[in-house]
Amino acid sequence: TQTQQQQPQPALSDVTGVHAGWNLARFDVSAAMIEEMADALESTGLKALGWDTLEIDEGWEACEAYAGPAPGPWPEGFMTTCATVAPRDERGWIQANLTKFPGGIKPLADRLHARGFKLGICAEPPAALL
C-alpha cells in the first residue's frame, strides 16, 4: 500500500471552489459586490480552475435592521441576524433587499449563470416546506 505521502494529490484544476462573501462583506453584501467577486475569479484565472460558485450568506434579505449576537463565538456587538422578521412573498419565500439587489436575486443569478457561474444563497425555506 502507498503511504499518504506517496498517494497522488489532486491537481488544482480538479478542485471545485466556492467563493463565499461572508468574511469579506458580512451584511454589506450587494449584487455589485458579488459581480466584482465574479470578475476577480475570472481575471485571476481561478474560474478556469473550477472556482465557479459564489455564495451569499446573510445580508441579502429585506431586513429593516440587523441584531445580534446570536448564540456562538461572536465578538461583542457583532450583528448576526435580522432584528425584524424578513418579509416573505405570497408563497413564503424571503424577499431580497431591493436596494442591494435591484430586481431581487434572480437578475443577479441570471447574469452570473450567463457567465458560467453558479450562485448559492443561505435562506430559510417557507414554513410550508418544513
Image: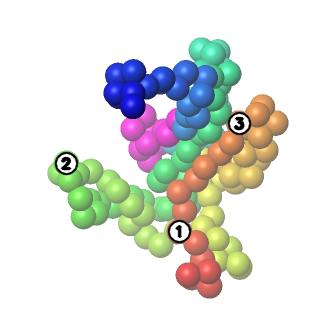
Task: Name the residue: 64% across, 77% down.
Answer: 92
Q: Relative to the observer, which residue lies in front, 49 or 92?
A: 49
Q: CA distance from mark 3 to mark 1?
A: 23 Å
Question: In the rendered image, is residue 88 in sight?
Answer: no
Front of the two marks 3 and 1:
3
Front of the two marks 2 and 3:
3
43 over 82 or under it: above or below: above
Instruction: Name the residue carrying label 2.
Output: 75
Instruction: Name the residue carrying label 1.
Output: 124
Q: Secondary structure at mark 2?
A: loop
The number of discs equals 3
Q: Residues within 10 Å of mark 1 (few under 14, many from 20)?
A: few
Amino acid under disc 2: Pro
Residue extent of the magenta highlight: 19-28
Verify whether residue 25 appears in magenta.
yes
Front of the two marks 2 and 1:
1
Residue 100 position, x and y percent, is 60, 46
Marks 3/1 in contact by CB < 8 Å: the verdict is no
128 over 85 or under it: above or below: below
Task: Name the residue: 70% across, 54% down.
Answer: 104
2 or 3: tag closer to the N-terminus? 2
Residue 18 position, x and y percent, is 55, 38
Q: Quadrant of residue 45?
A: top right
Instruction: Name the residue carrying label 3.
Output: 117
Verify whether residue 14 appears in magenta.
no
Q: Would you say the magenta stretch is mainly helix, strand or loop? A: helix
Q: Secondary structure at mark 1?
A: loop
